[in-house]
Image (cartoon, rainbow, N blue to C red):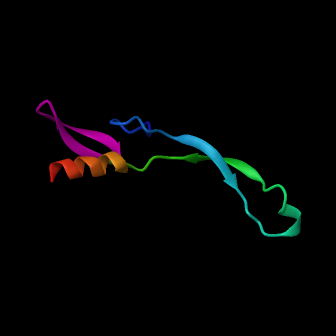
Amino acid sequence: MARICELCAKSTISGNRIQHKHSVGWRYKAPKTKRAFKPNLRSIAVDIEGTPSKIDVCMKCYKKLKAEQE
């Protein structure tokens, strides 16, 4: 399963993990390694043109859908 929001197309992006070690040798250049930022997905059931189906949405889209229903 691809980790993509089906409403806003938010997906996994990459960035750096920075080690902030507080010592003299690390003062000028903190070591960096690659890491992945994954979206917070939730599977919900919605009616699309009268047909119930499950879609994966991120929490930002989920909160917007909940606010529209209330």
User: Residue, x 35% and y 49% (percent of image)?
Assistant: 60
Q: Where residue 65 sits: x, y (%)?
A: 24, 47
Q: Where does residue 66 sit, x and y in percent of width and height?
A: 22, 51
31 relative to 38 in the view: left or right: right
Query: Is 44 in the magenta?
Result: yes
Q: Is residue 41 left or right of residue 11?
A: left
Along the line of sight, which residue is nearer the eye, 2 or 47? Answer: 47
Residue 33 picture location, percent across and down: 71, 49
Quadrant housing the C terminus? bottom left
Range covered by the magenta-colored residues:
43-58
Residue 15 horizontal/vertical position (percent): 63, 45
Which residue occupies 73% across, 63% down? 20
Number of numbered discs visible in the structure rendering:
0
The quadrant in which residue 4 appears is top left
Assign the magenta stretch its main secondary structure: strand
Q: Tell me which corner region of the image, top left, top right, bottom left or bottom right, holds residue 45.
A: top left
**Residue at the right extreme?**
25
Q: Please report the residue visible at 78 percent of the width from the left and 54 percent of the height from the top.
A: 31
57 versus 24 height, above or below: above
User: Looking at this view, is 6 or 29 the one in front?
Assistant: 29
* Drawn side of residue 9 relative to residue 30, left or right: left
| Magenta stretch encompasses residue 22 | no
